[in-house]
Image (spheres, grey):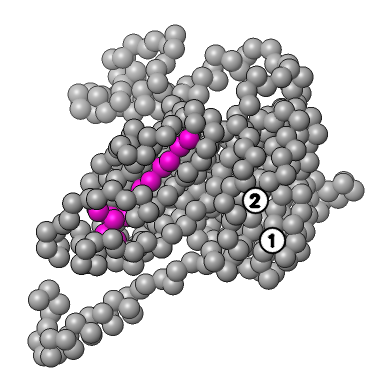
Amino acid sequence: MHIRNFQIPIVSIPNLFGFTNKKVMILFIGIFYLSTNLLFADGWETSIWKDKTYRNQRVSSADPTNGNDDFIKIPKKKTIAIAEIKTRGVIKHIWMTLASKDPMARKNAVIRMYWDNQTHPSVEVPLGEFFGQGWGEEYIMNSSPLVAAPKKGKSMNSYFPMPFESGAKIEIENESDEDISNFYFYVDYEEWKEPLNSNLRFHAQWNRSVTQPNTTNGKENEWGLLGETEKTVFKKENYFSVLETEGKGQFVGLNLYLDSPTPLWYGEGDDLIFIDGNQTEANLKGTGTEDVFNTAWSPKEIFMHPYFGYPRVSDSVGWLGRTHLYRFWVESPIRFEKNFLFLLEHGHANSLTLDLISVAYWYQSLNSKPMKVLPKKEFRTNKPEINFRHIHKWRDSFRSEKGYGEIWGYE
């Protein structure tokens, strides 16, 4: 990224704010340039002033009687089409929020999207996990294409552009045993007269796997804690699959919701991306899970950048419990002409038990082959939380094994 046609006197601006310390001045300049780069990163400053030929349109839950009941009800076990657009255009923004007696409503509701009269969906993802909130929870998520905004993450937003040539449909299915009593939404789109000149359409797919150690002795070994670590032997079936698809397209993003039953670091597993038929040697090979998400050295802190971040981390010991990571390749989508495969190791040499949920985002030519069907909510439930009670029971088992007595726990 760079700033186009934008020049400043580097030394004068810090002095305006009274900075005399050289290190402070350098830090200020770095932050200033970073923030300005992000401001101009999407290139809107070169196009926002140009004449537009589209027509702005919106489908929303606004009260048709001009009252203030600006919501719809989605009964339990029912599906409602919230938007059916018959023209050509591009969805530029989606906003949603809801109220339900079901505390897991965001996990038990499903969003589906259909383009150009295709009978099977191009998007089929639990609602919260599509917008960047895992496990049915509500928390802030602040990225370029997806934002969960105040109050406390209750507002869900998408800025992914979603083009369509001959129509679009968005459905919400409520799989819950409770009604969604209040469902509010905007679907903002541009109605186009000119052809799109692209047959790529927006897609999103959910996947989950509770992995098992693929070590020869069955041990969950990392960092040499239980002896020498094994070498990785590539077997596709041993890896967590983020996305496998056929056709022409561009991969643009990933939300990864990770639940670890051990305090051990979860992220020594590498990413492997295979492009256009090469399934013996990855075209793009990574060096560790946190590295995929542009961080380093086993982080455990909330951090959000437009393209990558950790909006939710575990507050338990070590890395026990839930961590949400995201990465968007919007600055340089990963292109493929024939097929695409994204695999992720679960620990080095696939040595760890992890509950991994991914939502992959990509653009692709419409495929007559339906995506893998989303499992029903009974198969999407969270794993039970492991807390201090369980840790103490582990300690008691250890003490029992050692014959009780003066056992501290490091033995």
Residue at 70 percent of width and 16 percent of height: 52
Which range is magenta? Answer: 339-352
Q: Is residue 409 left or right of residue 306?
A: left
Depth check: give the residue in front, 370 or 253: 370
Task: Tell me if mark 2 has few (under 14), some (14-19) or many (20+) residues whose alpha carbon lies within 10 angstroms of its own.
Answer: many
Depth check: give the residue in front, 1 or 347: 347
Depth check: give the residue in front, 97 or 198: 198
Quadrant assignment for the N terminus: top left
Residue 194, image x and y in percent? 73, 17
Residue at 24 percent of width and 50 percent of height: 233
Q: Quadrant of residue 401?
A: bottom left
The residue carrying mark 1 is 174
Q: Is residue 335 above or below residue 404?
A: above
Mark 2 lies on a secondary structure that is strand
Number of marks present in the image shown: 2
Mark 1 lies on a secondary structure that is strand
- How far apart marks 1 and 2 lie (CA) works out to 9 Å
Residue 257, image x and y in percent? 44, 54
Q: Is residue 392 above or below residue 400?
A: above
Residue at 37 percent of width and 61 percent of height: 211
The image's mark for residue 111 is 2
Residue 216, image x and y in percent? 21, 63
Q: Is residue 228 above or below residue 85?
A: below
Residue at 90 percent of width and 48 percent of height: 65
